Image (cartoon, grey):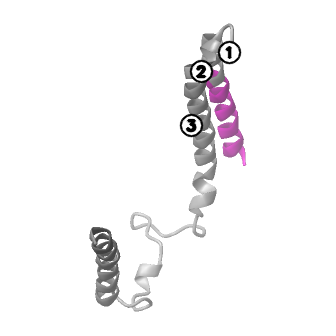
Amino acid sequence: MEVLVFALVSLAVPGAMLAFSWLVRPKPGTNEVQAESYESAEQTVGGHVSVMEEYMPYFSVFLMFEVVIIAVLLWAATARSVLPLPGFFVAVLPIAALFASWIALGMAHRR
């Protein structure tokens, strides 16, 4: 019974919030000024910039480095029984990932 009440409340609360926000929101297309871009009261130069194109190189570099660090942490926990010099490999892999990230970031800036 408690699970049913929890399920109903977990569906009813967000549903009520969405319904209320739909009722009180301004209608789309009523204000043309809101559709224009605003850059510190300056006239807009050029078109809109895609966020995905602007930040995707940084995200991909961060993701690659993050995956390498997670692999290093997992490797560090189990490498003692597998490798003769686990500390060397654990230290070299993040440094190699840092250089690879640096190269990828340089390539992203050159495009």
**Residue found at x 58% / y 52%:** 55
Amino acid under label 2? Thr
Q: Secondary structure at mark 2?
A: helix
Identity of the residue drawn at 57% across and 30% down: 69
- Among numbered discs 3 and 1, the one appearing first in the sequence: 3
Residue at image mark 1? 82
Question: Of helix, strand and loop, which one carries label 1?
Answer: loop
Q: Which residues are magenta?
A: 94-111
Disc assigned to residue 78: 2
The answer for how far apart the CA atoms under marks 3 and 1 are is 23 Å
**Contact, CB < 8 Å: mark 1 with mark 2?**
yes
Q: In the rendering, at what x and y percent does residue 41 appear?
A: 39, 67
Q: Residue 48: x, y in percent?
A: 57, 68
Q: Quadrant of residue 64?
A: top right
Q: Residue at x 59, y 45 (%)?
A: 58
In the picture, the disc for residue 66 is 3
Q: Quadrant of residue 52?
A: bottom right
